[in-house]
Amino acid sequence: MKRSFESAVRQQWKENVVYQIYPRSFCDSNGDGVGDLNGIRSRLGYLKELGIHILWLSPIYKSPNYDNGYDISDYQAIMGEFGTMEDFDALLEEAHRLDIKIIMDLVVNHTSDEHRWFVESRSSRDNDKRDYYIWREAVDGHEPNNWGSCFSGSAWEWDENTGMYYLHCFSKKQPDLNWENPKVRDEVFDMMTWWCEKGIDGFRMDAISMISKKEGLPDGPTEGLYSPCTYGACNGPHVHEYLQEMNRRVLSKYDLMTVGETGGVTVEEAKKYANAEGTELNMAFQFEHVELDDGPDGKWYLNPISIPALKKNLTKWQKELDGVAWNPLFFCNHDQPRVVSRLGDNSPHSAKCIATVLHFMQGTPYVYQGEELGMTNCPFGSIEDYRDIESINAYRELTETGLRERSELLGCIAYKSRDNARTPMQWDDSPNAGFTTGRPWIMVNPNYTTINAAAELADPDSVFHYYRTLIALRQDSKWSDVIVYGHYDLLAPEHETVFAYTRQKNGITLLVVCNLSARAQTFSVPKNIRWNSAEPVTGNVPRAELTRELALAPWQAAVWALT
Ligand code: TEU
Ligand code: CA
């Protein structure tokens, strides 16, 4: 029977903030230049200080690391470089002791080609694991369709041994699983159950909107050299059916938080993925707001994000999901450049302003490691400085085909590369930012001498303490209720740089005003907003007073509670 839900259905995962760790770059405990599980455990106190109760770990499973762990060769073993299963158990136990939950990355759209399922599947046409993956005959001596991989090239790889192609929406080292095969679903659900029995607290589901491909795998419209496989793979005909089955067979049996990485998701689709009745997932990541600066054929452009467009987009998600689903709120993750270098000007002041915009919206905020320090994009030089398969493959394909000029493209990669998010966490001003005593696997951002956790912990005005305050306001203040559950309304949609909105619940109105610009601006509080008294909640300028005509400093953010 259908029930109707209010946004105010209380859930712990709505009231907390999620902190994402990219284990390879967080903290190295043994000097091999690669972050690891014991490194994470040694920093739990830091996360506690920030106020974190939920950690999402990017993949830590056994992997040949062509895509930094998003290519898994054994779901029930730990990557050797990260430690052992005992190290994981110790991390989980210590986290739980500190009241911190651990959410695992679940990468089941594809496996590594070194996973035993694929090794068997490719061994012969009649192997009993053949249908675990998506194999097709050549069509007129060519690939079965025009789909391109997210990491350049065709989405099909020819297998000499059996004379057929297999589908890989990501690199050819990441063959797509065939979810239409019930045995694949059994295997995945058994593996998930094994982790749940271990006591983990939830899943972030990688590329989960791509597990059901369009019937017949038809050609799609081309952009550049191929048709992005996302046209044929995202939100396919059976995706909700598979997630409901997963929910029935696994998720509903445990107390978990779940969030899907649902590329290509529309508001209508998100209402299903993250429906408030809880038959699929708790939240669904949408990416429209971080694609507003894309060019005609993808991300490698220097376009700025237009603030009115950003407001319009996020407002659509705020309004449409209120009461029927739940938004995850993010600007940063391991696939995005640093937001302070994208929407801001690299200054701590701009980092605080951007954080304010996000943390006062309705939804669960996600903080990506280093974001709470205002960590910036990295001044990479040549293509040799990069480690990310997406950046390296794109550079090769677009320059070799003559579609882009080398130095121009390199500038765009410097701006947008996922590696900007993957440089080591900046702990202090000692060599290699205190991340490792060895040689880091990727360069350290040279600005660690000024931007680092030790310096920010000691400075009450730092970005770190600003985030700590935002998190405390949400979790433990007289405004928690309206911050988490209040209704959202945008103000002044046309204003070129000021992002202003209200949140309302039980007669309390929060007024949030953020000047996303390096210039001073004026802002008129709309006439329909009235107040007898305005109490400052937070902001990045001391003693900001609310007046009808506001004179805002560059990057000023201010929040008032109106009564
Ligand atoms: O990302 C899926 C995805 O859609 C991304 O490839 C996205 O298009 C790209 O990163 C934008 O630059 C997930 C993971 O988050 C990513 O790190 C993995 O590489 C990918 O899946 C494959 O597992
Ligand atoms: Ca290590």
Image (cartoon, rainbow, N blue to C red):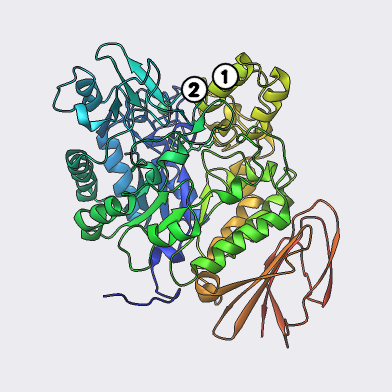
Residue closer to the observer: 490 or 125: 125
- Image quarter in which the N terminus is found: bottom left
**Mark 1 neighbour density, 10 Å: few (under 14) some (14–19) many (20 or more):** some
Query: 360 or 39, which is in the foreground?
Result: 360
Total numbered badges shown on the rendered structure: 2
Secondary structure at numbered mark 2: loop
265 in relation to 77, above or below: below
Q: CA distance from mark 1 to mark 2?
A: 7 Å
Q: Is residue 97 above or below residue 529?
A: above
Indicate left or right for 215 with 560 as reference.
Answer: left
Q: Residue at x 21, y 31 (%)?
A: 131
Q: Which residue is mark 2?
A: 153
Which of pointers 1 and 2 lies earlier in the amino acid sequence?
Answer: 2
Identify the residue at horizontal 65%, vertical 21% (top origin): 403
Q: Does the Cβ of the disc 1 residue fall within 8 Å of ligand 1? A: no
**Type of amino acid under label 2:** Gly
Instruction: Tell me if I can see residue 337 in this picture.
Output: yes
Contact check, label 1 and label 2, Cβ < 8 Å: yes
Query: From where the camera sits, is residue 469 visible?
Result: no
Q: Position of residue 440 (x, y in %)?
A: 52, 23
Amino acid under label 1?
A: Glu
Name the quadrant containing residue 486.
bottom right
- Looking at the rendered structure, which numbered label has been put on residue 1? none
The percent position of residue 156, horizontal first and vertical second, equals 39, 24
Q: Secondary structure at mark 1?
A: helix
**Residue 483: which quarter of the image?**
bottom right
Residue 390 percent coordinates (x, y): 52, 27
Q: Which residue is mark 1?
A: 397
Position of residue 501 in the picture relative to residue 85 (left or right): right
Asked if residue 12 lies left or right of residue 526, the reply is left
